Image (cartoon, rainbow, N blue to C red):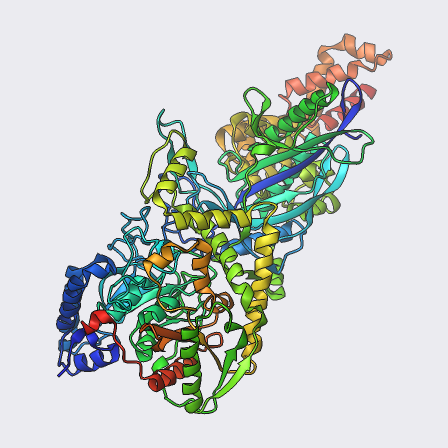
Amino acid sequence: MVSKLTDLTISDALDLLNKKEISSVELTKAHLAEMERARFLNTYITETPELALKTAEESDKKRASGATIGRLEGIPIANKDLYCTKGVRTTAASKILSHFVPPYESTVTQQLKDAGTVMLGKVNTDQFAMGGSTMTSYFGVTKNPWADETGVYNLVPGGSSGGSAAAVAAGLCMGATGSDTGGSIRQPASFCGITGIKPTYGRCSRYGIVAFASSLDQAGPMARSVKDCALLLREMAGFDAKDSTVADLPVPDYTQALTGDIKGKKIGIPREYRSKDLNPQVAAVWDKGIAYLKDAGAEIIEISMPYTKYALPVYYIVACAEASSNLSRYDGVRYTTRVDGKTLDEMYENTRTDGFGPEVIRRILLGTFVLSAGFYDAYYTRAQKVRRLIYNDFVEAFKSVDAILAPAAPTTALSYEAMKNMSPVDTYLGDVFTTPSSLAGVPSLALPVGLAENGLPVGLQVIGKHFDENTVFQVAQALETAAEFDKKPHYVKG
Amino acid sequence: MTYTIKGKTADWELVIGLEVHCQIISQSKVFSPSSATFGAEQNTHVSFVDAAFPGMLPVVNEKCIEQCVKTGLGLNAKINKYSRFDRKNYFYADLPQGYQISQLYHPIVGEGYIEVTTDDGTRKIGVERLHLEQDAGKSIHDMSPHSSFIDLNRCGVGLMEIVSKPDMHSPAEAGEYLRQLRAIVRALGTCDGNMDEGSMRCDVNVSVRKVGETALRNRVEVKNVNSVRFVMQAIEIEANRQIEIYESGGMIDQETRLFDSVNLETRLMRSKENANDYRYFPDPDLLPVILTDEYIENIRRNLPELPEAKKKRYIETLGLTPYDASVLTVDTETAHYFETAIQGHDAKKVANWIMGDLFGYLNKANLTITESPISAENLGALVGFIGDGTISGKIAKEVFELMIETGKAPDVIIEEKGLKQVSDTGAIEALIADILAQNPDKVAEIKAGKEKLKGWFVGQIMKASQGKVNPALANQLLDKKLAE
């Protein structure tokens, strides 16, 4: 018999469901109860228990009737509140969209629905996915289910997909959608001790996902194992005529890549990631990860990616520029909140000043600045050129290696206090290891490999070639097996 | 003769460029599947993409790409095999995205030209570029004193912005450029060219300089000049305004003005200091448009005959004057009417009838050529009956009037009204003999040398026959009788 339904991985739960040992309703109820108990973590912005139970009941009926069922039939998941869900409020964790109920469904969540998943609700994120802590959310910060050394829950879960990561780690869903623009899946996965993959840019449709930076935004799954991520990504990915930037490529069954065998695989270790920003405790886990892969038969190759250090400034120029334009549509004229004014311009000003949080406003201003006449070439054009060089770094590296292993974040989860006392630019430093692969568009999976001396999880990222998620999953699973990371957050241990 | 304006201190010449927005003829909008047709109830042709809902993405409509390429080929222009979309950022209530998707850096069509014929002859006016962009919605300010209303039906409809080089130097030339451009897009079926419905809109750039100057002075953009006549008026008015300012010691700023067609003046809309910074940058939601030679050649092969080629053919093979040829090729319908009417008939004479009597009537009745009560076949037949002597030119005018009234074919009318020209020499001779017998005094005068009186006799003959006598024959027979 199973210990606890909310501890199961998706692949185990699917086995039990198929063997009729458990039902989707049971599974869903267990998660709903856990969500109730864990309310203090503030992971969900909107819970949809009635909808979840109704879906679970239908799913059980479907399974019982012998009808064709989805590949993830009956699995309860959570969606980042950046995904538009038909009839269910979608806020992007902002005030300006705090009342917005989309009349349409995002492609990715629709595909997950079609696969039979049960949505438990919408989870917290940094406002418009801008931030690395969920502290910019209009709906309050999410607590990391890992406590600090004194046993207090005062750590951030990371972000922007911090609600997804915390909910997965705490057993408040079996898997969750996240989105990653500059590390928003991988950094929270690392902070919360779970697994998450940012697939290749163009692997998943962006249709119906509230846009932050269009050339970087990418949907991806977060779960408690590499295999679960592989199962989820298969459903989320694929061509979509409604998004011009999504690749028209077949989506493989990623679980087929989980052979456990990585003998002879060439793994690159980028020299430039051993920077002054890297916390020694994290570096130690990285070294451990390298040793695991070596022991598993991989060939470890030191590589150089000279443009790495420019990734962070390039990222903040490109992402803010795109965001400043993408967020113009929230203007008080149509579906957003509105604060009136005497003139149209005054209404815009009032609405946007009131509806956006300070970090969003900061990035809109930054983006507006770098696109302005007289500054465009010095910032935006230059950043695009350097982005190309960063891309070339990866192309060059992948001529000699199959995958790259690097830390996901320079530190373990920080406390709110520490974050509050940091300047915005200092907080941006947390993205230093994730932004290069975002700018290059290559797939990258973060998974927990060990604990730091402070008892907090440390994630490493496995980075692969464009559209070669298979190798990423393959290497990540080998690492997962070797690391035997079975540590649970304090919240789960109780 | 070059067009100049005589000022108090000097002669001034004009430098004119036009930016013309042409709404693309397509089923759906340029980046969304909503209908692009005109005239529906407000806000019924609006998708979530058009209204810029969160997470909505543009997907380019291939038909609009094809229409741009077609138009580009019609403008003798270079088709760019690589083009890209950029965002033009500004806030306005009828622009839901907060940016217009356009093409600043890499337009789909590059340099080309339009041949324009005026009294000064034929010149090639350069086209700088054609780019594809989306239209904005419509703000309606006059429905309520307190609110504005927004109609998003037009929002997202595809537009071709066609920018000329500053190659024009007179209002007439600008007007003719616009007429030719309209004729081209109509012939291609890429834009209906209706300026009063706003499916073709024009902004005019005007600057002036003293004759002999080579540098360009500051230009003023005059917005929304929405007919050929207004374009010509606006240029003249704006040029005169600028000359007056220069001559009284002032300077012209690069600014945007609005044409007021009621008060016949231009008014300041936006000074240079208040110009928008549109923060153009490549739209990351859309991929570049890559065209193959094969694609372009395929469109080229299937192009209809363009007004310019048609015009050349009318001049060279039908013997029309350049002026007549331009008028008849100005739109597809007129050309089609003409070409139908000339089947088996004298092209030059048919042209004269169309441009004279028919246009005169249509203008007066405010009808288009497709609404003409006289079919092209019937007009051709009428010209044929003059040519073969069945009726005289004079009678033909009468038949023409009756054709307008009744819509009947000319042969029917000639038959019914008995208007057939009398060419029976015996009958005419009898008639002449009669008239001569009644006017012996006048006959005597002619015989005494007063030749002019012959005309009087011909008049009498025509009168007596109600114009049905062939006038040439009447003259000939009269001479013969008098000589007897």
Q: Residue at x 28, y 59 (%)?
A: A142
| In the displayed structure image, the side of residue B272 where residue B212 appears, left or right | right
**Residue reaching furthest to the front:** A150
Residue B239 visible at all: yes
In the displayed structure, B218 sits above or below A152; it is: above
Q: Is residue A413 left or right of residue A377?
A: left
Q: Is residue B228 visible?
A: no
Q: Residue B49: x percent and y percent?
A: 39, 51
Say which of B120 and A124 sits in front.
A124
Rendering quarter of residue B80: bottom right
Task: Say which quadrant the C terminus of chain B sits in.
Answer: top right
- Indicate the quadrant where residue A410 lies: bottom left
Residue at 73% of width from left, 20% of height from top? Answer: B249
Quadrant position of residue B42: top left
- The correct choice, above or below, for A363 with respect to A116 in the image is above
Rendered-image quadrant of the N terminus of chain B: top right
Residue B177 rendering spot, x and y as whole percentages: 66, 38
Closer to us: A344 or A248: A344
- Which residue: 52% across, 64% down? A311
Q: Is residue A7 above or below residue B178?
A: below
Asked whether B193 or A490 is in front, the reply is A490
